[in-house]
Amino acid sequence: MKLRFSATLFLVAFCVLYALVFALDAPLFRYYPLHGDFNWGNGVLKGVGPAMTWYGLMANAGLGAFVLALLIPDRWIERALRNFLWLFPVATMLVCVFLLRKFFA
Amino acid sequence: MAEFPDRHASTPPGKSAVSPWLVTTLLILHALVGVALLGGITHQAVSLLRARPDRNGSFLARYAGVSPPPFTIAVIALYVANVVLGALIYPSYRLNVRIPFEEMSLGWAIGLFELKEHFAGIGLGALPFYAYTWRPDSLAAHRRDRLGITLLLGVIVWWDFVVGHVLNNLRGLG
């Protein structure tokens, strides 16, 4: 099987995965900056200070999208969504605004 | 004040082990790279919007009269560099800025930073597609995608720049 990276599929997969991982609060790992601790998976460590999830979110969405962009052919998505692909990141940004609305209430 | 057990006696609770001058240096670099990125993406977006060449010699005509494709590599390099710099100083923000924001009940400021961080990440994920739409063999087929993704990156860069400055004015990292 010949592997070929598709930027189009990477964009779609990254945006969908990012929104999902953020909504489900399921980063690949959490980082605890107070003492530099990492915790793989979904568990939360107690007593080691505040956790940071953004690195884990990026890793989860980035790695997942990279694998999908290598494995899945992009012909269909290129043909069906051409010139509407830029809406995927816009939709993901709107999901983020919705999920963070509690800060502005 | 949030209390954490003193597992490493040399690091006081709520403080990063990274030296303040290094964090300040990285923060200044983050801002300077942000200025360059702002200039590059705005130049490219304006020239893309002003598709009809105007040769009357006005400032706007000259500003928009550049060839947009060569900006692509510069925008990608500056964007990646700025996200890396932001990611390096992010732990200091989490410990030395966000906790005081929580104590001051500045939820909107925390929300603005969260949006900045997520928008920057989404923009990073969109960079391969941005590069793809600016390739010579994609110029005709992805005209609307190229316009949309370039304007979107411009919005993200402007948002992140303005929010970063507002938050730094509220409470810097030093």
Image (cartoon, coloured by chain):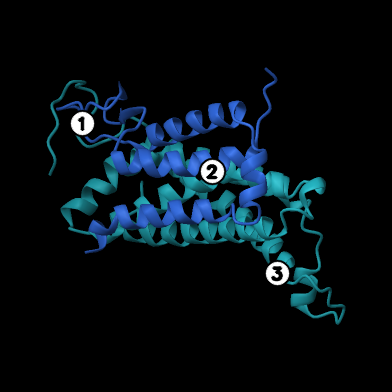
Chain colours: A blue, B cyan
Nearer-N-terminus badge (3/1): 1
Badge 3 amino acid: Leu
Residue A94 visible, this angle: yes
Of tags 3 and 1, which is closer to the observer?
3
Of tags 2 and 3, which is closer to the observer?
2
Q: Is residue B110 above or below residue A27?
A: below
Q: Which residue is mark 3?
A: B49
Badge 1 amino acid: Pro
Q: Within the image, what quadrant is residue B96 found in?
A: top left
Residue at point 67%, 39% (across, down): A75
From the top left corner, tell me how far across and down residue B123 is, in percent: 53, 48
- Gap in angstroms between the C-alphas marked 2 and 3: 25 Å
Residue at point 19%, 22% (across, down): B9
Q: Are marks 2 and 3 in contact (CB under 8 Å)?
A: no
User: From the image, which quarter does the N terminus of chain B lie in?
Assistant: top left
- Left or right: residue A94 versus residue A88 is left
Residue at point 78%, 51% (across, down): B70
- Left or right: residue B14 versus residue B126 is left
- Both on one chain, marks 2 and 3? no
Task: Give the label on residue B12, or none.
Answer: 1
